[in-house]
Image (cartoon, grey):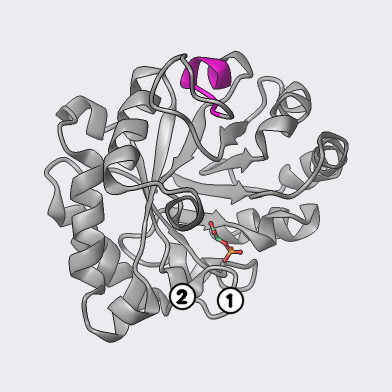
Amino acid sequence: MRQLICAGNWKMHKTAREAGAFVDTFLPLARAVPERVEIVICPPFTALAAVGSKLNSGRIRLGAQDVHWEESGAFTGAISAPMLREHGVQYVIVGHSERREYFGDTDLTVRLKTAAALAGGLTPIVAVGETLELRDAGRALAHVALQTRAALEGLSESDIARIVLAYEPIWAIGTGRNCDPAEANAVMAAMRACVPGLRDVPILYGGSVKAENIAAYTAQSDIDGGLVGGASLDPASFAALCANAGGA
Ligand code: PGA
């Protein structure tokens, strides 16, 4: 059976205190989640320590939402891979569409961040996805393939084997309008084929994933879990989602 990943992307939600309270409630609920589901929580930087100290060395992994491509330097406001590692971070989301839209992340900086995450011992969750305009123009596949190739350019085969990809159609994020699972699966199968070495790389679907619909995604041939925004903010709903992903 394939290993699955459910990653909660909290975005700019929860103070350290609120994040700690989430984990206290979530941990006992997460015991019902099948072992084949790797649970990742990606809080804001300021809550990493609070969440990390409660997770200890358990089965739930800590993730961050962004990373800078340099290890240190004059980059006001930025956080590097070694700084994240120090807090026990194992995963980092790179290239989320909100970073691309509001913070100027480009294909080039996504590539640099992906390489920096790998060099720093983190697993990048590289996010790609098309706008509604591109989808309606029939260009979703081409766009997603372009973003995927750009993000992975120059990586060795062994590095590519260590990444996670996420397909998040922008029109499905936070809208309640999730992409049809079969349609998402077709895009993800095409992503797998667009760069050598992606055959066994986990690809997550993101965009209005909920406890009620996750199983329809993980039942697909090329979908290895979910990248979850809104439904990861409540401990009971995220625990149910993770359990349903694994068919519990
Ligand atoms: P959503 O967000 O689950 O709230 O749609 C997903 C994401 O942006 O990663």
Q: Is mark 2 within 8 Å of ligand 1?
A: no
Quadrant occupied by the C terminus: bottom right
Q: Nearer the viewer, residue 205 or 219?
A: 205
Residue 82 located within the stretch drawn in magenta: yes
Label 1 element class: loop
Residue type at the position of mark 1: Thr
Check disc 1 and report the residue beneath it: 175
> Quarter containing ligand 1?
bottom right
How far separated are the C-alphas under marks 1 and 2?
7 Å
**156 sits to left or right of 16:** left
Residue 184 located within the stretch drawn in magenta: no
Q: Say how many tags the image has.
A: 2
Q: Is mark 1 within 8 Å of ligand 1?
A: yes
The part of the image, by quadrant, that contains residue 18 is top right
Circle number at residue 138: none
The rendered magenta stretch, by its main secondary structure, is classed as helix
Residue 115 at what x, y percent from top left?
A: 30, 28
Q: Which residues are magenta?
A: 78-85
Residue 15 at what x, y percent from top left?
A: 82, 40
Q: Is residue 142 above or below residue 51?
A: below
Whether residue 73 is visible to the viewer of this picture, yes or no, is: yes
Residue in view at x 66 percent, y 32 percent: 45
The part of the image, by quadrant, that contains residue 243 is bottom right
Circle number at residue 171: 2
Residue in view at x 51 percent, y 37 percent: 66
The part of the image, by quadrant, that contains residue 52 is top right
Residue type at the position of mark 2: Trp
Is the Cβ of the residue at disc 1 closer than 8 Å to that at disc 2? yes
